Amino acid sequence: MTAGELKAFLEELKNEQGFSLAGWSPLEKPLSLDLYRQWLAENRHGEMKYLEEHLPVKENPQSRFPFARSALVFAVPYRPHPEPREWSRSPLRIASYAHGADYHFWFRDRLRALIPRLKEKFPEAEFEAHTDSSPLLERDLAVRAGLGWVGKNTCVIHPKAGSFFLLGEILTSLEFGDEAAPLLDFCGTCTRCLDVCPTQALVEPRKLDARRCLSYLSIESRQLPPEELRDKWGDWFFGCDLCQSVCPWNQKPFRPSARDQQILANIEWDEEVLLLEELRRILTSSGKGLERLFQGSPLLRAGPFGLKRNALMVAAHRGLDVLRPEIEALQDHERLGELARWALNKLGAAEATPPH
């Protein structure tokens, strides 16, 4: 199969599953491995120790996937979300990818659905679907597959598709001769993503200190946020989209249409009331209750502790004094007590501040 034929076949496959981009890359030592190793050595991954444990496999993928020689790389957009659920209209401020079902499941299922088609074309080859929970340097594969460049916000950016997409791979025993031509880096002199980050987590272009990132602090971390970053948290409940939202390459593909804007203008609902109800339910529910509430949602990644922690942060930053009884009830909580007292102090300070 020629490179042109393979490209046409992948185009056909991606359209079948609603993917936006597709390409292929050799599966070998990543080009960005030394940068990744340095990032780990600087401890910028925080509590995510599994990233250290994955290093040998990322360096030599065949140590885990001995059959694999190449990766078919696919991207699926999540604005609008392809698998919306009832919490999609939640008044909580959450990252765009979380406005629907957990992609670790539906995205992998969509990738697996392509394997029978690939087996028809290549009956002797092996194929295996993976999402970002596998020990692969996905961004490296995506860049080598021609799906974009790594922007200053550390996301893969495509000039037509922006960066609001998820990456997934089908590893295969096939070897493809021609590698895709890399896309040029079009970030230029722009620093909007670095400038907008409230915690200065982007310590320099293309280098993220996860320990300062709101996405890490509200999802991956199992600790209370550092005191010096709490006032910078804002009202994000789960994740953060700021460094992508300001990117010029996301302005055109994700600008709401006139029809969408009209629909949004006609929606009548009291967001503040819904927000209070949602936060109250999170602050008062048991761990099992929260697991039932968010079953199938990416929000469960934070765990019951993380969800309550995040709810306290949102209540404090939104000045929701009406939730004071629910917050007071957590003052003696073994892990959340200190943050509950901080939130009460912040609410008290907000109450005492005269209006401007």
Image (tube, rainbow, N blue to C red):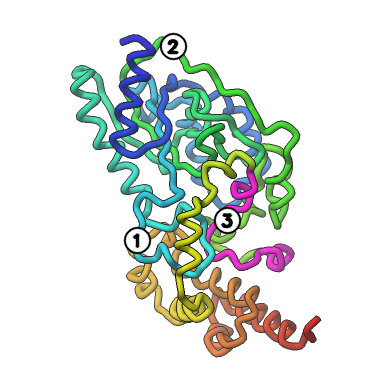
For marks 2 and 1 on the same chain, the one whose residue lies earlier in the sequence: 1
Q: Amino acid at mark 2?
A: Asp
Q: Which mark is residue 85?
A: 1
For disc 3, the neighbor class at 10 Å (few under 14, some 14 to 19, many from 20) is many
Q: Residue at x 46, y 80 (%)?
A: 277
Q: CA distance from mark 2 to mark 1?
A: 41 Å
Q: Decide: marks 2, 1 in contact (CB < 8 A)?
A: no
Residue 244 visible, this orientation: yes
Quarter of the picture holding the N terminus: top left
- Which numbered mark, 1 or 3, is in the foreground of this view? 1
Judging depth in this view, the residue of 327 and 67 nearest the camera is: 327
Above or below, 19 relative to 265? above
For disc 1, the neighbor class at 10 Å (few under 14, some 14 to 19, many from 20) is some
For marks 2 and 3 on the same chain, the one whose residue lies earlier in the sequence: 2
Disc 3 target residue: 240
Q: Amino acid at mark 3?
A: Cys
**Total numbered circles:** 3
Disc 2 target residue: 178
Q: Position of residue 278 (x, y in %)?
A: 46, 76
Judging depth in this view, the residue of 109 and 14 nearest the camera is: 14
Q: Position of residue 205 (x, y in %)?
A: 71, 38
Q: CA distance from mark 2 to mark 3?
A: 37 Å
Judging depth in this view, the residue of 200 and 225 nearest the camera is: 200
Q: Position of residue 194 (x, y in %)?
A: 71, 46
Per the rendered image, the range of residues in magenta is 227-247
Is 235 colored magenta in this rendering? yes
Q: Residue at x 51, y 61 (%)?
A: 94
Q: Which image quadrant for residue 9?
A: top left
- Which numbered mark, 2 or 1, is in the foreground of this view? 1
